[in-house]
Amino acid sequence: MFLGAHQAVAAQNLNVFIADHYGAGTAVSKITTNPSTAMLGAGGYFLCTSTSDPKCATSATMTALLPICKSASEANCVESLAVTSPKAANGEALLIKTIGKKAFEADPISGTPAGASWSLFEVPELKRAGEQSLYAVNVSVSFQKFPIVGFKATDFSAAVVPYTLGTTSSADPHPEEYVDPTGKTSVRGLGGDPKCVWIESGSCGVEATFPNDARVKLTVHVGNYLTSWLHGRLTDPNISISAIDTQQNRLSVDANPVTVPAASTAQPVNALDPNLVNRFRDPNGNLPSGDLSMLVESSQSTAMDSFATYEKFFSNKANRLDSVWSFRALGASAAASMVPAGPSSLPSSPTGILGAITGMLGSGTSSPTTAIADALGMGVAAAKCSSQISAVTGAILGNNSSTALIGLVTTNAMTYDAKPPQFKDGSLDYKVAGLHLNPDDTVFSGRYDLVMDSKVARCLYGYSDSNAPLQATVEIIDADGTTKVTTSNLRESNGWLKLGVYGFSFSSPTLKVKLVQGTPVVNPQTPPPASTPASTPANTPANTPANTPASTPASTPAATGVKAPMKTISCVKGKTIKKVTGANPKCPAGFKLKP
């Protein structure tokens, strides 16, 4: 969240923007000290030139935009990019350059990467086809340094942004030290242009849109800080992760971009609730002169709360649609932040994240595996899945652990809960929020994709038979209590379970995903006797290859192993409508069959 003030305006307004850009145009690599570092006397932020800078000897915070890989075994780097379309099947992207100079070099001793900047690519075949061919890549990792422990990763994100060449009079984005009004040294970002994705000496990349039906594949080398869940802005994704060594993985994400709505509003400050305005006052109770501005990145952890606060000002209508392809990792800091710290926590310590993890494990209420599994959204049900969760636990605690990835959740909703789906009462629950209408007054259509490790999914739901296909039932509960139940496209292949839920509307639905295990597929080596053909019609699982469920919609009975055909009925109770699907569906108590 960014706060600022624009000078010399006649009437003071509060300008609120909600968009999804992951800091495009202002992202820079930098190392700063922790603001509570006692060794620097007055405290505050200070810039460091490297991980060995004496100012950062005890504690530090690092943001590193990863450079391009120079070898197959190099750590923390961008390996390749490909963008295809119906007009360009070969989407291999060629590196143009990485803008600017490195802010700092990699440090093998601390395990931290070099700090680079945006890398620019061109796709020759797209250019020949007359389609968008220039793309900027930003893969960013954040680290925090703790006493004794050293550097630990706290966040990870990746974005591919189409751009066209433009110019700007703004300076290149860069950090600088300054003395704040309290007399303490701090660090601020200067330069940058909101119209530009990247800036270099007056040249800039102006954000464009992906080609129709584009497909993007990004491959990066990342450490074991990439753990548990990915979340972000993709649809119909495929993921692949393999170990380079005990500390580094090769991750490929292949998906279509999504259209994400953005919104803005300008409200007179003197007409607003004082509680909203007070958030912008300085310690002396004064408001900055000029307009107040707030930019909310719609996939950051506080976006849902911010959207709820300002939703009433947006008139239930987006004012812009952005073409987005990006994702983030739920790392150790996010996992720790979701667990109440116990008696051993250190809330006032500069090692806040480490303190939270210490408190979580020192509270005496749960084992490390159970506590972290609960933080990852798995709940107490994951205690039985210790073999699947142990790799994630090891990664969060900083032990050697490769390919520790539970899954990926993505959506095109304006905002969403940037946490893993929560496993409660037999379903995975996921919350999204947004405005009901597009800029052209058409109804915005929501998309939700879930990719999950098959073993973890089957363990959570108690389905141990890997030969039995799974069917997904998705319950969509809107903010007004209206409930819809639908079966959804579910596929299982290459060790991953893939679910897509499309076509739901807003404003704040909760998606509840339940899995049902069908009849195990009969081994084709032992078909039923020829004298009983009635028991094995041509479309039953007995005559369906074992991999059919991976490519057939789950609502097709033959593909899921459900013996009886499924049908859907609508039930009403006042304004609440429920759709119930099953072989012999019945309305719940208190509901009546809708005529």
Image: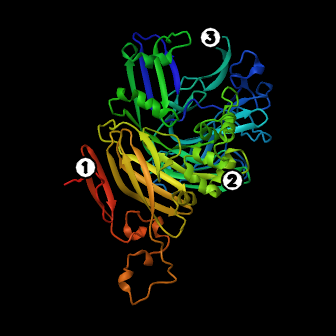
Counting from the top left corner in percent of width and height, residue 537 is at: 36, 80
Amino acid type, callout 1 = Val
Q: Earlier in the sequence, mark 3 or mark 1?
A: 3
For disc 3, the marked residue is: 181
Depth check, front residue: 533 or 14: 533
Residue type at the position of mark 3: Pro
The disc, 1 or 2, on the residue closer to the chain's N-terminal end is: 2
Amino acid under label 2?
A: Ser
- x and y percentages locating residue 150 in the rendered image: 76, 36
Structural crowding at the residue carrying mark 3, measured as other residues with C-alpha within 10 Å and reported as few (<14), some (14–19) or many (≥20)? few
Q: Secondary structure at mark 3?
A: loop
For residue 572, which numbered disc appears in the image? Answer: 1
Between disc 1 and disc 2, the foreground one is: 1
Q: Taking 443 as reference, is 563 above or below it?
A: below
Q: Residues within 10 Å of mark 1 (few under 14, many from 20)?
A: some
Mark 1–mark 2 distance (CA, rounded to whole Å): 50 Å
**In the rendering, at what x and y percent does residue 134 appear?**
53, 43
- Residue sitting at x 75%, y 28%: 49
Q: Residues within 10 Å of mark 2 (few under 14, many from 20)?
A: many
Residue under label 2: 402
| Viewer can see residue 237 | no
Regarding mark 1 in the picture, which secondary structure is present there?
Answer: strand
Residue displayed at 65% across by 56% down: 242
- 413 vs 66, left or right, is left
Say if 19 sits above or below 462 in the image. Answer: above
Q: Is residue 561 visible?
A: yes
Element carrying mark 2: loop
Circle nearer the N terminus (3, 2): 3
Give the alpha-carbon distance from disc 3 to disc 1, as whole Å: 61 Å
